[in-house]
Amino acid sequence: MPVAFKRNGMTGRAILKVGDGTAVLASPWNPMTHVGLSTTTRWVAQLAGREFTVVKERARFFGGTRNCQVVILADGVEVASAVGY
C-alpha cells in the first residue's frame, strides 16, 4: 500500500495519502499551523483501518531554512522516512 506525505511550505497545508484515502493533517486556515516553537510536530490519522502517525522534526536554529526529517508510522511501525523541506 503506497504511503505519501506532502506539505506545502508556503501555506502550511499537510496531507497524508494512503492508497486511495487522503487525510488533511494541517490546514492553512488554522492559525496554529503557522505558529510553533516545538522542533517536533506529530500528526495522527486513521486511514485504511490503521492508525498512521507522521512525525516531522526540524532543526533548532534556522529551522525554516534547513532540511527536516519526516517519519511515517503505521500502527507504531515505521513504513517510510525522508529528509527534505
Image (cartoon, rainbow, N blue to C red):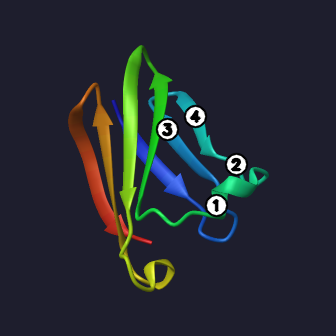
Which quadrant of the figure contains the N terminus? Answer: top left
50 vs 12: above or below: above
Q: Quadrant of residue 60?
A: bottom left
Which quadrant of the figure contains the C terminus? Answer: bottom left
Q: Which mark is drawn over residue 53?
A: none
* Distance CA(mark 1)–CA(mark 2): 7 Å
Check disc 2 and report the residue beneath it. Answer: 27
Check disc 4 and report the residue beneath it. Answer: 23
* Distance CA(mark 3)–CA(mark 4): 7 Å
Q: Residue at x 44, y 29 (%)?
A: 19
Q: Residue at x 70, y 64 (%)?
A: 11
Q: Residue at x 47, y 84 (%)?
A: 65
* Distance CA(mark 1)–CA(mark 4): 14 Å
Give the residue type that dot 1 points to.
Gly
Secondary-structure class at tag 1:
loop
* Distance CA(mark 1)–CA(mark 3): 16 Å
Q: Which mark is drawn over residue 17?
A: 3
The tag earlier along the polypeptide, 3 or 4, is 3
Image location of residue 43, percent across then percent down = 47, 41
Q: Which mark is drawn over residue 12?
A: 1
